[in-house]
Image: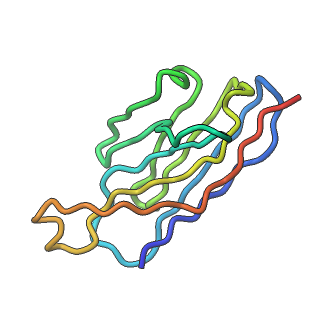
Amino acid sequence: QVQLVESGGGLVQPGGSLRLSCAASGSFFRLNVMGWYRQAPGKQLELVAAITSGGSTNYADSVKGRFTISRDNAKNTVYLQMNSLKPEDTAVYYCNARLFTTSSSYWRNDLTDYWGQGTQVTVSS
């Protein structure tokens, strides 16, 4: 079984910073893309940022220039550095990992999605 454990959420004032972490553990063959999604009250889940195992990144337009995603492949961990936070960044942030569960799934290019439990980020004065 695969587990994603998130940490780093909290309450911060506008203009402040937070760093989210998500560590993948358990039995799997290889991680592929890792990313962060968020869901604000009354809104749909949206992609915030994603990073491939090779380090290629993708960001939502609303966070470009303010957020930075990175990963430590040796630790199976993804980070989201969030700077210049705005009230509209308030949401529950979810870690996502797309991975190959076994070597046979790797050769079939068969990826499985796993999700963290979510961490609340609140930006308010």
Q: Residue at horizontal 32%, vertical 44%?
A: 52
Residue drawn where x is 71% and y is 49% of the image: 120
Whole-percent x and y of residue 96?
Answer: 45, 54
Q: Position of residue 26 (x, y in %)?
A: 43, 77
Q: Quadrant of residue 19?
A: top right
Q: Residue at x 46, y 37 (%)?
A: 49
- Number of marks: 0
How has the structure been colored for display? Answer: rainbow
Is the residue 101 above or below the residue 44 in the image? below
Q: Is 49 placed above or below 104 here?
A: above
**Residue 51 falls in image quadrant:** top left
For the C terminus, the quadrant is: top right
- Between 35 and 117, the one nearer to me in the picture: 117
Can you give x and y, in whole percent of width and height, for residue 73 in the image?
39, 56
Q: Is 101 placed left or right of 37 in the picture?
A: left
Is 70 rendered above or below residue 111? above
Comparing 46 with 32, the one in front is 46
Of the pair 94 and 100, the residue shown nearer to us: 94
* Horizontal and vertical percent position of residue 17: 72, 33
Q: Indicate the quadrant containing the N terminus: top left, top right, bottom left or bottom right.
A: bottom left
Please, which residue is most extreme toward the front here? Answer: 42
Query: Which residue is farthest left?
Result: 107
Q: 98 left or right of 84?
A: left
Is 8 displayed left or right of 33 in the figure?
Answer: right
* 87 shown above or below 5: above
